[in-house]
Image (cartoon, helix red, strand yellow):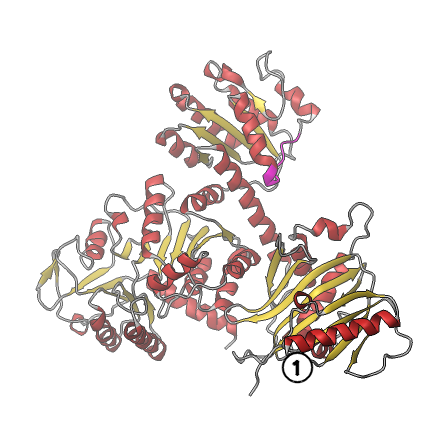
């Protein structure tokens, strides 16, 4: 069976869970406010049309339904069992369910890996049960799942206490039950609604990657929201994000645990060990997900995407009822790369009969308070602006004007049906009824300028990444050296360069290792550099172990004596003095390759030079990667303009540089190495040299 077929089969078990038509609640309570009473109460009140089976040996009836003493006593097929017992009773409940033919479980109970080692061991046994019997388990320590289309509410969230179910195109995967509840409250209160909702908790079996994979195939899901603290199966997570991007289903993600305090809180929350935040950032961006900082930012981006109002490009036409608001929108747009181009002559001419005589056609367009007496003018002006097919969206600013809100809604709704591009409204002080009416017409409404413009820019960023993913060939499985998890001591620069000489992508300067007392080689290509060599002195410059720009034999001899003296003072084993030709170059970078214990092989590029640590300029890329990926990576460096050539300084050949780095990455993947750092990697047009290199080998059996 191919990996893709296997992945689809695994995803189908989650789909079967969300389509459950018979649900048992183990430990069901007659009190609808209790944890094991809420799912039953919610499904009874909201019209779940499947069969419900309360399991409680102490009762004959629960919430008006016959109660059963055990799962086996039900005597009918059960698609899903909800377990909310004490932690020490969960394992036996799942074993009983497996014996009764139950294929899926949602476990609310806490007291597992998030608590202590005993809880971690108990959670491990649940994992083994899932694997051995091919059942799906969500949780433990989760808030459950929900399907708005079928009314399946296997959850005890308080978000459903005061809201009706409202189907929508937004789905959510959360490793935090509380964040999941807040999200559900927001989408139900705002009228956005949802399709599927899953809180994965401690992830003893079904994890966020598998849940995303399910949502990619869910026909009712248009946009996927995501809250994560840690990902255990990085390869599966990357593949799921990639599938979502290729399927046109945007993923908007919150990754918590970026601070040391947040990472510690995540560990106590779900037993997670938060990984390197910069690499999570890279992973999400590289695979098309939009990382946001809050649920508010998530809703802002989702509002554009769900209403099909994300612009196809950065060119905006702006209309306001206040000249000051137009200035603020222009100010907010420019740093985000959004453009407010001058009106084309024919567009300005089309606006003349629409606008009052005292209004000058421009972008931003200030319609003034005249809209109070001629509100339909808004729609006519929008149609005139939309005659420019290069306009990617029309942004309208309104402030209050509640007395003519209905007229505004009518004019905008009619305009939306007649213009080719999205309409985005910023309405300060908008009434809920106006927001709901406009969004029902496909016009997203924001309450302030910064959040609207930020959402537009972030959605454009996501669309550009998705376009790159679609053009990128699907990843081909490659064999590379496995990570043993153990490392050998880092090699000296000389030894590292001898190993690096086995590849052809990056050149090594001509060099000679001189032992104590050896004569200088004849015909050295001055100027040269002399460097003290020891596997216990990895940062030579800090100890004065590098002498630059040596112009002749006499100066070289003095430098060697000085370096040997430093070695003696440091009391370290000295391998020798490396003498290398100094080469002219135009640019320098830091290049790092390493096998990360969580993310696997990673490429890091950073600005080189002595000032790099004062102002870090760093980008990462998860491997494998193509030359196009690496060229895009280089373009994200703030120093990229310098690489292209600046003020007469020659530029690097970026495509050639990207190909050389791609080849070096391929070489690294085949070597038993933990880490390779070249600093600096110097560049002259299409030629590349490693002036210094540190290599840490893997320990192999």
Q: Nearer the viewer, residue 242 or 561?
A: 561
Query: Which quadrant of the figure contains the C terminus?
Result: bottom right
Q: State the predominant SS element of the stretch in magenta.
A: loop
Q: Is residue 547 positioned above or below 433 on the image?
A: below
Point out residue 598 in the picture as x, y percentages from the top left corner. 50, 69
Point out residue 584 in the picture as x, y percentages from the top left corner. 83, 61
Quadrant in the picture for residue 206: bottom left
Query: In the picture provided, is 158 more to the left or to the right than 227?
Result: left
Residue under the image location 77 percent in, 82 percent down: 515
Quadrant in the picture for residue 364: top right
Point out residue 690 in the picture as x, y percentages from the top left corner. 74, 68
Q: Is residue 532 positioned above or below 333 on the image?
A: below
Q: Is residue 72 positioned above or below 412 on the image?
A: below
Q: Nearer the viewer, residue 339 or 113?
A: 113
Labels in figure, total: 1
Is any atom of residue 419 visible in this view? Answer: no
Q: Which residue is mark 1?
A: 573
Query: In the picture provided, is 192 more to the left or to the right than 387?
Result: left
Q: Nearer the viewer, residue 652 or 175?
A: 652
Residue 336 lies in magenta, yes or no? Answer: yes
Residue 99 lies in magenta, yes or no? Answer: no
Q: Is residue 231 positioned above or below 501 on the image?
A: above
Q: Which residues are magenta?
A: 335-341
Is any atom of residue 651 visible in this view? Answer: yes
Q: Residue furthest bottom?
A: 701
Residue under the image location 70 percent in, 23 percent down: 345
Element assignment for label 1: loop
């Amino acid at each position: 069976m191919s990996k893709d077929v296997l992945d689809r089969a695994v995803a189908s078990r989650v789909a079967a869970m969300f389509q459950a038509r018979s649900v048992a609640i183990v430990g069901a309570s007659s009190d609808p406010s209790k944890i094991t009473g809420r799912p039953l109460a919610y499904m009874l009140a909201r019209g779940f049309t499947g069969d419900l089976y309360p399991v409680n040996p102490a009762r004959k009836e629960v919430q008006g339904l016959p109660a059963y003493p055990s799962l086996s006593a039900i005597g009918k097929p059960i698609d899903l069992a909800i377990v909310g017992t004490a932690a020490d009773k969960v394992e036996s409940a799942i074993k009983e369910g497996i014996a009764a033919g139950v294929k899926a479980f949602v476990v609310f109970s806490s007291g597992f890996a998030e608590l202590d080692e005993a809880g971690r061991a108990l959670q491990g046994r649940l994992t083994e049960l899932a694997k051995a019997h091919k059942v799906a388990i969500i949780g433990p320590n989760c808030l459950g799942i929900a399907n708005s289309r079928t009314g399946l509410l296997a959850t005890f969230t308080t978000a459903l206490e005061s809201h009706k179910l409202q189907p929508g195109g937004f789905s959510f995967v959360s490793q935090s039950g509380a964040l999941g509840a807040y999200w559900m409250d927001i989408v139900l209160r705002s009228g956005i609604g949802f399709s599927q909702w899953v809180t994965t908790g401690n992830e003893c079996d079904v994890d966020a990657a598998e849940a995303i994979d399910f949502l990619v195939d869910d026909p009712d899901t248009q946009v996927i929201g995501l809250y994560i603290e840690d990902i255990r199966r990085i390869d599966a997570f990357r593949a799921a994000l990639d599938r979502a991007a290729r399927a046109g289903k945007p993923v908007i993600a919150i990754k918590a645990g970026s601070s040391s305090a947040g990472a510690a809180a995540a560990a106590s929350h779900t037993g997670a060990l938060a990984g390197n935040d910069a690499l999570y950032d890279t992973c999400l961006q590289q695979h098309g997900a939009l990382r946001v900082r809050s649920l508010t930012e998530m809703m802002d981006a989702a509002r554009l995407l769900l209403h099909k109002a994300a612009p196809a490009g950065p060119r905006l036409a702006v209309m306001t009822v206040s000249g000051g608001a137009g200035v603020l929108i222009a100010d907010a747009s420019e740093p985000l790369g959004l453009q407010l181009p001058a009106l084309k002559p024919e567009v300005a001419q089309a606006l003349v009969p629409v606008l009052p005589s005292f209004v000058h056609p421009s972008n931003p367009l200030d319609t003034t308070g005249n809209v109070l007496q001629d509100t339909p003018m808004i729609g006519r002006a929008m149609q005139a602006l939309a005659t420019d097919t290069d306009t990617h969206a029309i942004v309208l600013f309104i402030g209050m004007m509640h007395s003519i809100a209905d007229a505004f809604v009518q004019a905008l709704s009619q305009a939306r049906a007649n213009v080719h591009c999205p309409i985005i409204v910023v309405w300060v002080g908008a009434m809920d009824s106006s927001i709901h009416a406009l969004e029902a017409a496909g016009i997203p409404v924001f309450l302030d300028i910064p959040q609207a413009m930020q959402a537009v820019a972030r959605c454009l960023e996501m669309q550009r990444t998705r376009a790159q993913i679609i053009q990128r060939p699907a990843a081909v499985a490659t064999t590379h050296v496995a990570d043993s998890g153990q490392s050998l001591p880092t090699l000296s620069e000389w030894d590292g360069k001898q190993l690096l000489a086995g590849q052809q992508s990056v050149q090594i300067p001509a060099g000679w290792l001189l032992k104590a007392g050896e004569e200088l080689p004849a015909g050295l290509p001055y100027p040269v550099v002399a460097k003290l060599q020891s596997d216990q002195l990895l940062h030579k410059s800090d100890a004065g172990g590098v002498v630059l720009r040596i112009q002749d034999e006499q100066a070289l001899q003095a430098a060697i004596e000085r370096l040997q003296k430093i070695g003696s003072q440091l009391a370290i084993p000295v391998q020798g003095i490396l003498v290398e030709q100094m080469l002219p170059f135009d640019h320098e970078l830091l290049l790092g390759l390493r096998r990360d214990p969580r993310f696997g092989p990673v490429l890091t590029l950073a600005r080189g030079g002595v000032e790099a640590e004062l102002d870090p300029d760093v980008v990462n890329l998860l491997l494998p990667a193509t030359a196009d990926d690496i060229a895009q990576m280089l373009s994200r460096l703030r120093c990229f303009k310098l690489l292209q050539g600046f003020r007469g300084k020659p530029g690097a050949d970026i495509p050639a540089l990207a190909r050389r780095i791609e080849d070096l990455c391929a070489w690294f993947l085949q070597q038993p190495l933990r880490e390779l750092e070249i600093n600096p990697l110097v560049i002259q047009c299409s030629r590349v040299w490693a002036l210094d290199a540190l290599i840490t080998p893997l320990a192999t059996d």
